[in-house]
Image (tube, rainbow, N blue to C red):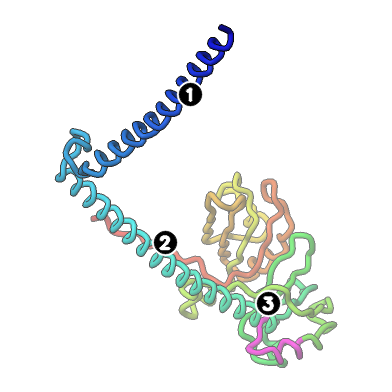
Amino acid sequence: MAAVAEISGEAASAKNSNLDSMSKPMTESKSKFDVQKLVDMFTKLNPLAKEFFPSSYSPQHHSTFENSLAVNNNKLSANGNQANSRRRTNNFNQGKRRLSGRAYRAERENSIRRTVYVSDIDQQVTEERLAAIFSSCGQVVDCRICGDPHSVLRFAFVEFADEYGARAALSLGGTMLGYYPVRVLPSKTAILPVNPTFLPRSEDEREMCSRTVYCTNIDKKVAQADVKNFFETACGEVTRLRLLGDHVHSTRIAFVEFAMAESAILALNCSGMVLGTQPIRVSPSKTPVRPRVTRPLH
């Protein structure tokens, strides 16, 4: 009996194994069939079919979107071209400015090499006399005497037509002008040019310049009447006065015309005197004080 039971058990296990071996190929073939079926279905689908696009999409909307992209790209390229051309233009202008700046610096350095600095000048020495003395060294282009607020003596800048005149002028150091020997050194600055429209146009205006002084470093709180009273008390009658200033500079300037040329010479001694809260500087004026032109009312 035991032997029969064992045989029947082996038969049952063999039957089950056979069933398992049969079911595996069937499962694998079924899965392969399902995958292949899906592949066949997808290959038959049309990707441009209406069902695959959202309802908001339309061919007209698509073309409009493409057109807007094209317009934006054109705008960007146009802006880029404009920016490049603007950059080229700006660079060109900057180059021109740099060239003009270099030319200006070169001209200024050339002017400095043609200029000498003269100090310890007596108050009685005029610009005409100083220019006449230095003209023995070469052609004098400009001569500018300035007042020194820290000294009773004055200093000047003399500009020549070439560098040879400036070099020769250095040998005049120690020459007696008035009561003092002058010192002559190479200048470190150029003479600031005067607007030609302000220069004297006639003999009468040149005579006016001989009676006029140029005053700088005037306290802004000082009124024109105070400036006139200051010079009249120290030097003599003032016939015309022009007080000028702006919002940029902390001090003002004035052109003071006297009735007598001797008063203008005395006014040069006022350099260094305090007017208001500032020591003023007084120099001979190169421009006359012209009367103001009254414009007719329309």
Circle 1: is it few (<14), some (14-19), or many (20+) Cα within 10 Å? Answer: few
Q: Earlier in the sequence, mark 2 or mark 3?
A: 3
Can you say which quadrant of the picture contains the N terminus?
A: top right
Left or right: 191 in relation to 99 = right
Residue 126's disc number: 3
Q: Nearer the viewer, residue 191 or 152?
A: 191
Q: Which residue of the protein is positioned furthest toward the top in this rendering?
A: 1
Q: Which mark is residue 292?
A: 2
Assign a secondary structure to mark 1: helix
- Does residue 11 belong to the magenta stretch? no
Q: Earlier in the sequence, mark 1 or mark 3?
A: 1
Looking at the image, is 271 positioned above or below residue 11?
Answer: below
Whether residue 209 is visible to the viewer of this picture, yes or no, is: no
SS at badge 3: loop
Q: Which residue is mark 1?
A: 17
Up-down relation of residue 210 to residue 62 (above or below): below
Evaluate whether residue 203 shows in this view. Answer: yes
Q: CA distance from mark 1 to mark 3?
A: 137 Å
Q: Who is closer to the viewer here, 242 or 15?
A: 15
Residue 208 image offset from top left, x and y in percent: 53, 72
The answer to whether 211 appears left or right of 49 in the picture is right
Assess whether mark 3 and mark 1 are in contact (beta carbons under 8 angstroms).
no
Q: Residue at x 53, y 18 (%)?
A: 10
Percent across and percent down for residue 221 are 60, 44
Q: x and y percent of residue 111 in the render?
A: 64, 81
- Mark 2 is on which residue type? Arg
Residue located 58% across and 67% down the image: 212
Q: Mark 3: which amino acid? A: Thr
Please report the bounds of the magenta region as a residue range: 158-169
